[in-house]
Amino acid sequence: MAATIYYENDADLSHLKGKTVAILGYGSQGHAQAQNLRDSGCDVIIGQRPGSANYDLAVSHGFKPMSIDEATKAADVINVLLPDEVQGDVYRQQIEPNLKPGNVLMCSHGFNIHFGQIEPPKGIDTLLVAPKGPGHLVRSEYEKGGGVPCLIALGEGAAESTKQIGLAYAKAIGGTRGGVIETTFAEETETDLFGEQVVLCGGVSELVKAGFETLVEAGYQPEMAYFECMHELKLIVDLLYEGGLSYMRYSISNTAEYGDYVSGPRIITDETKAEMKKILTEIQHGEFARKWISENRAGAPFFKATRRLEREHGVEQIGRGLRRMMTWIDEKEV
Ligand code: NAD
Ligand code: MG
Ligand code: MG
Ligand code: MG
Ligand code: MG
Ligand code: MG
């Protein structure tokens, strides 16, 4: 099943002509999408809380940010680029009361619409345009004349004209220069959650910690364990990013490649894959979303406690010191 991909000639900016686009939230995605839209000739307004650093940033970029209510009221196309965990409440209190029939409600991640935290009234189409990269790259690539590839998805029952607006929007932020892949809210949301939980964040974090612990418990120096199980990941990931598994394996030693083939499958086993399938099912059935939403409602006690505890893991303690030895690293401490 090949994906449908749209490019420059499939999108027409005129579908945004005469329409005002409100970017709600001037953060990572908001600041990039807003500036790209403006540079593409679109009429853009910003909804961002005064007194915040991002409010001042929007002002310094020549925008006149207003409240979420005001921006929603004044716009035809409203893109919710607030943190996912606040979108539901802000939607109910400040966005929904100000929507008008014919408005298009957009997002860059389907979590809240897919899991029913945002349920727009009849007459309001929903639309997703999601850059496959962080905001600073969406901006810098656009400025260079390129663009970060995007996903596009239409909400249930949305009109064909809304898709044209979505393609125009994707073009205006540079997406069609790279390519815009058609998906659905369900697919975007579920694959995003799965990838971050199983591979990118959950999988990698646990793999690093378990490898580090195994070496340290066997009496090896934690400094050595840090380099072998954490630091060198970047070399491997850079190779994967540029040329996939084959290029990574081409680039590493034959010894490392042989070890990959014989030991990798003993670490990620049938049992691991069975658990991956369970996690996917929980995501699909909305169990993960329900837990995360109620965790936030309760003030996120598990989340905050775990974050504190994880910061004190041995690999974190040793890493802080070692990264100071590597002056070329733009060291980040949280
Ligand atoms: P962010 O945290 O960088 O920015 C959010 C903005 O909302 C900030 O300007 C903040 O001041 C404002 N804000 C926070 N709480 C608020 C509240 N209660 N009321 C009003 N304003 C509030 O967010 P982001 O990373 O740009 O994410 C925005 C959306 O884009 C999310 O749906 C996210 O999943 C999606 N997305 C992000 C990325 C990324 O790389 N960051 C990539 C693709 C999609
Ligand atoms: Mg974070
Ligand atoms: Mg993702
Ligand atoms: Mg995500
Ligand atoms: Mg090595
Ligand atoms: Mg090799």
Image (cartoon, rainbow, N blue to C red):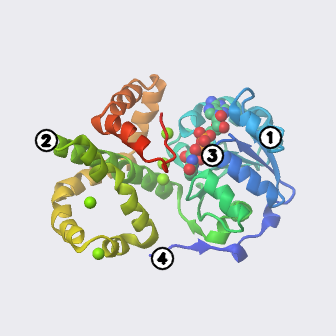
Regarding mark 4 in the picture, which secondary structure is present there?
loop
- The x, y position of residue 170, in whole percent, is 68, 62
Does the CB distance between marks 3 and 1 fall below 8 Å?
no
x 59%, y 37%: residue: 87
Which one is earlier in the sequence, the residue at label 2 or at label 3? Answer: 3
Q: Which residue matches tag 2?
A: 219
Instruction: Tell me if 33 is positioned left or right of 333 in this view.
Output: right
Separation of residues labelled 2 and 3 (CA atoms): 43 Å
Label 1: which residue?
A: 60
**Marks 4 and 2, how far apart in space?**
50 Å
Closer to the chain start, of discs 3 and 1, is 3
Q: CA distance from mark 3 to mark 4?
A: 31 Å
Q: Which residue is mark 3?
A: 28
Mark 3 burial class by Cα count in 10 Å: few <14, some 14-19, many 20+: some
Which quarter of the figure has residue 18? Answer: bottom right
Mark 3 residue's CB less than 8 Å from ligand 1: yes
> Please, what secondary structure does the residue beneath circle 3 have?
helix
> Where's residue 39, x and y in %?
80, 58
Q: Which mark is residue 2?
A: 4
